[in-house]
Image (cartoon, rainbow, N blue to C red):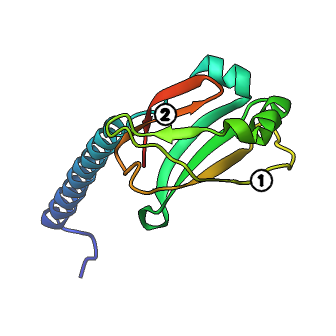
């Protein structure tokens, strides 16, 4: 009795290997296409060089959280001294507005106020959201006479 595979068995294994390769390639194409569509559907966070230079921060994310009752506005510190002055300036806290409805935020909680703000570290403000913004809206962040428009809301 021989244990060597017959020609028919070898052909069967080759067909199986080719079929697996075709399925894996098609699956890879589907995942790549879906990832590309998702990335294209999510608008990029805008930046404003003047705002960043003046405030020492770059706004990085606006997200509706807590079952829609709060909005978190995140930012990254670019300059520690300027960012500290920005965060400590309670008279000029950022206002989050929805240009589509004209609504804007009123109540904000400062997170990490008075602490050191190292460059590259992320911090955030939390706003009460009384229907001001919803996921997929475009918002405007205004502070110190500057505005960042077209901010995507997650």
* Residue 13 vs residue 74, the one in the foreground: 74
What is the x, y in percent for residue 110?
Answer: 70, 52
**Quadrant in the picture for residue 15:** bottom left
Q: Position of residue 73 (x, y in %)?
A: 57, 46
Residue 45 bears which disc, if any? 2
CA separation in Å, label 2 and label 1 = 23 Å
Residue drawn at x 42%, y 62% as measured from the top left: 68
Q: Residue at x 27, y 70 (%)?
A: 4
Taking the image as shown, residue 27 lies to the left or right of residue 97, namely: left
What residue would you read off at disc 1?
Answer: 112
Q: In the rendered image, which quarter is residue 11 located in?
A: bottom left
Q: Is residue 60 above or below residue 12?
A: above
**Seen from this angle, which residue lies furthest left?**
8
Q: Secondary structure at mark 1?
A: loop
* Labelled disc at residue 146: none
Q: Closest to the observer: 114 or 19?
A: 114
At x 61%, y 45%, the residue is 74
Q: Can the viewer see residue 97 in this picture?
A: yes
Asked where in the image residue 136 lies, by quadrant, the reply is top left
Question: Front-most of 22 and 106?
Answer: 106
Q: In the structure shown, which secondary structural element does the residue marked by tag 2 occupy?
A: loop
The crowd level at tag 2 (other Cα within 10 Å; few <14, some 14-19, many 20+) is some
């Amino acid at each position: 009795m021989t244990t060597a595979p017959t020609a028919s068995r070898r052909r069967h294994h080759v067909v199986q290997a080719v079929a697996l390769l075709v399925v894996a390639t098609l699956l890879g194409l589907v995942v790549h296409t879906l990832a590309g569509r998702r990335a294209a559907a999510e608008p990029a966070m805008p930046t404003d060089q003047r705002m960043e230079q003046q405030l020492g921060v770059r706004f990085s994310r606006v997200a509706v959280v807590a079952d829609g009752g709060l909005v978190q506005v995140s930012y990254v510190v670019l300059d520690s001294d300027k960012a500290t002055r920005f965060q400590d300036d309670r008279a000029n806290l950022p206002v989050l507005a929805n240009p589509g409805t004209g609504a804007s935020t009123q109540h904000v909680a400062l997170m990490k106020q008075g602490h050191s703000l190292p460059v590259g570290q992320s911090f955030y403000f939390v706003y009460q959201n009384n229907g001001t913004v919803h996921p997929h809206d475009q918002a405007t962040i205004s502070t110190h006479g500057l505005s960042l428009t077209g901010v995507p809301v997650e």
